[in-house]
Amino acid sequence: MRAMVLERAGRPLALRCLPVPEPGPGQLRLRVAACAVCRTDLHVVDGELPDPKPEIIPGHEIVGRVEALGPGVAGFREGDRVGVPWLGFTCGACRFCRSGRENLCEAARFTGYQIDGGYAEHVVADARFCFPIPDSYSDVEAAPLLCAGLIGHRALRMAGEARRLGLYGFGAAAHIVAQVARHEGRRVFAFTRRGDAAAQDFARALGAEWAGGSDEAPPEPLDAAILFAPVGALVPAALRAVDRGGVVVCAGIHMSEIPGFPYEILWQERVVRSVANLTRRDGEEFLALAPQVPVRTEVETLPLDRANEALARLREGRVTGALVLVP
């Protein structure tokens, strides 16, 4: 099979021809139909996340069809269409797994980081962490739901009942979250790179009532802000933008250093919290909710062998919505 392989952090992915993987006990082998490109892939490729699997195949927003079932798999048949997310394995036995917080599992393994992912023609995945895909979505439309959608959904829940919601970084996740937030009756305020008129117009088209630069103050205080941009300097900016009792949710897996800030902008019971990974319950809830909104994903497709171009465009902020690789 063809696959894009990270041979060494900081270098472009290499197109390789590899054996088609065989599913082990409890696993499915999928023929990949689409794999969205996520900022977390950039963090892996650029070496910002430590100790990836040697010669890892990135990609964790995978839609494919079941080709083969390993021993002990039940509930799936050949030909089923399923999605594979970032969370690829949990132990089920640690205190976090036993308390419904498998996203914090001490032995968790992640797709496209410790487990070969979807920048390939075939992928093997733990059947327990595969989700049926709603029929109303095509393969490429569904792919961004598997991380941008799922992490965005978890981040929105961490924002509580906030009615005035700020979204910092209007990319793949924010363009999905904005639709869900509007469906729930929330008011959306979008923050983009300074002068990025295209992103601001895109945000307004998806229901944001205000859009401006991330260095600007919103027209009124926010109840909560979600940071999708991995820029630590946005934490104090968001704290200044939220009202008393407001919440700032950091939704990324990696962020640049957060600069020092005066206690007064945290005081009055403002909260800063992070979101880590996802649970299978998050996946089930969001994939049931998305067709009801209905969430529409803005996607652009590229062939698998242009994965490096896709990553470069994401790194440079030249993406509207999401990029999706199609083998």
Image: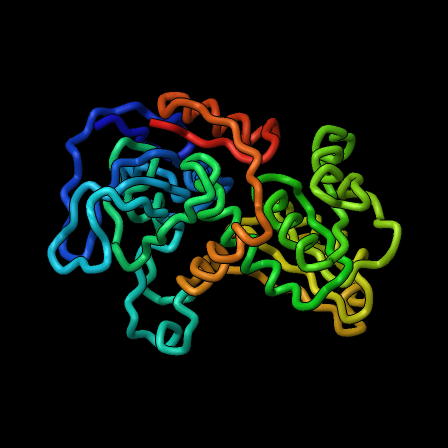
> In this rendering, would 265 be left or right of 260?
right
The image quadrant that residue 65 belongs to is: top left
Residue placed at 39% from the left, 44% from the top?
60
> In this rendering, would 85 be left or right of 151?
left
The image quadrant that residue 93 belongs to is: bottom left
36 vs 173: above or below: above
Residue extending farthest to the left is: 71
Q: Is residue 46 visible?
A: no
Camera-side residue: 161 or 245? 161
Residue placed at 47% from the left, 54% from the top?
287
Could you tell me residue 150's position as x and y percent?
50, 53
Way the structure is coloured: rainbow
Residue placed at 29% from the left, 47% from the top?
115
Q: Quadrant of the C terminus?
A: top left
Could you tell me residue 145's position as x and y percent?
48, 46
Q: Is residue 198 visible?
A: yes
